[in-house]
Amino acid sequence: MENKLIVSVSPHLHKGESVKRIMWFVTASLVPAGIAGVYIFGLKALEVIVLGVVSALISEAVLQLLTKKKVSIFDGSAFLTGLLLAYNLPADVPFWLPIAGSFFAIAVAKHAFGGLGQNIFNPALAGRAFLMASWPKYMTSFVVPFSPDTVTCATPLAAIKESKLIEHISYLDLFLGKRGGCIGEVCIAALILGAVFLLWKGYISWHIPLSYIATTAIFTHIFGRQGSLSGDWLFSILNGGLILGAFFMATDYVTSPLTRKGQVVFGIGCGLLTFVIRAWGGYPEGVSYAILMMNAATPLIDRYTSNRIYGTKSL
Amino acid sequence: MKNLFNEFLKGIIKENPTFVLLLGLCPTLAVSVSMINGLSMGLAATFVILGSNLIISSIKRSIPDKIRIPCFIVVIATFVTIIELVMKAYSPALNRALGIYVPLIVVNCIVLGRAEAFASKQRVFNSLLDGLGMGIGFTLALVLISGIRESLGSGRLLGITIFKGFEPVLIFSMPSGALLIIGLLLGFFSLIKGKRS
């Protein structure tokens, strides 16, 4: 007689989701922003994206072969890391910059900590921080949108930091991405399209993005440059990497808190740090550092916001 | 004889002050920007450990137990002053490069640690061997770290350009790069150790 009863531990219902599936869906949701970036900055942007992704995949394969682990370059995680790293770079960087960044992201930020699911810091952002500390001159020269030859310009946030707004940029231009900036961060419209898709599929929840963006906007408004309650909060949302960071990088499963309560704390912390760096720090933009710092605080947040176990008293 | 040899050898690999005992990290982070700085710091510390181990193990019976740490520090400070004055007289540029970290050898935990854990309990000759081993271990670690940092952080080694047309990885000439290199080396050594046992 065949054994028809299967005894196993819970959960018994499986939705059919897997790491691989989620990673590829997140990657797909980032495609519109990439297309917009290539449209705005030209084929140089495509070159950076391809180099970032390919070198991330190669680094992953080589490291997994060296450490005698199963080679898992098709699970999408290395692809996504390379893609996000490239989205965080200006379009006219030298060809070796995305390669170095991807290698650092995969080798040091991911595999030195034990591989997928073990990393403390978001690998793509760690790669960006490494590049920013190592070759700042390439990381801060941005291409003018729609220019055939590579003319560089400051991002609107950098211009404000140096208290000189060269030309007025309308909110619509900012929303569509007609400004200097990193490849994947400029076109807010395309990013929101991808973010809505992820929210609809339930791959990310609203807790981190909403609390993050709202905190940055509120504090920017309160502590305006022309006196309190005068800050341009819409400008602060549409500029820099805030949308890209809040929806696609702060929500990384591995490096963000597990509970809803914790995620709100995480988002508020990211928002506060972003505002502080933008307003008073040395850099014009602080999204990547804000998320990295809150990544480091994630284990602590998880400890203090864990859900009450049924039948026990609260912590 | 083998025992004596072990006293010398343990400081280099098995109980390497930087990579195993994790002592003296403050000067390690600060001076390992260039290989010449790392090497001189290591040699200066080696001289101080040798001197303090020699004196402390010979006067260990007359040091009162309750105030032994101040006594150690006085002995160590004597040798640090000697090395600092010599450095100032013969190589002022190096002294400027190492800066405050030369006087800070007085409270370097490798030197104090050897005095407390070894020299104050052991025979003079053993203490000398122990100090020499620990000093060489510290020097080797510093040379390794500063060699990696200098070659990647500025494309040079001992001041000579080794990579042409290379864009220096600035992070490695900053303290954050030192932490990164030490962390990666620690991980690498424990990987090897794990494989062996």
Image (cartoon, coloured by chain):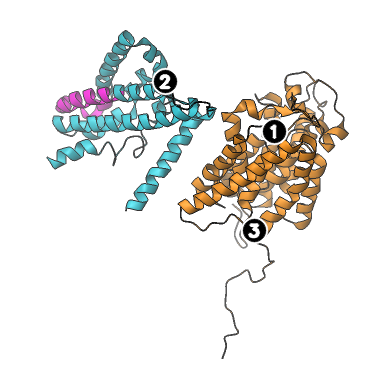
Chain colours: A orange, B cyan
Residue bearing the label numbered 1: A90
The residue lying at 47 percent from left, 27 percent from top is B163
**Would residue A250 be seen by someone viewing this image from the given angle?**
no
N-terminal of the two: label 1 or label 3?
3
Left or right of B160? Residue A89 is right
The residue lying at 59 percent from left, 33 percent from top is A131
Residue bearing the label numbered 3: A20
Magenta region, residue range: B45-69
Residues at circles 1 and 3 in contact by the CB criterion of under 8 Å: no
Left or right of A245? Residue B25 is left
Quadrant hosting residue A243: top right
What whole-number distance in Å separates the C-alpha atoms at marks 3 and 2?
Answer: 49 Å
Q: Is residue A57 magenta?
A: no
Q: Quick one: which residue is furthest to the left in this view? A: B1
Q: Quick one: which residue is furthest to the top in this view? A: B89
Q: What secondary structure characterizes most of the magenta part? A: helix
Residues at circles 3 and 2 in contact by the CB criterion of under 8 Å: no
What whole-number distance in Å separates the C-alpha atoms at marks 2 and 1?
Answer: 33 Å
Residue bearing the label numbered 2: B159
Amino acid type of the residue tagged 2 in the rendering: Gly
Amino acid type of the residue tagged 3 in the rendering: Lys
Quadrant hosting residue B62: top left
Q: Quick one: which residue is furthest to the bottom in this view? A: A1
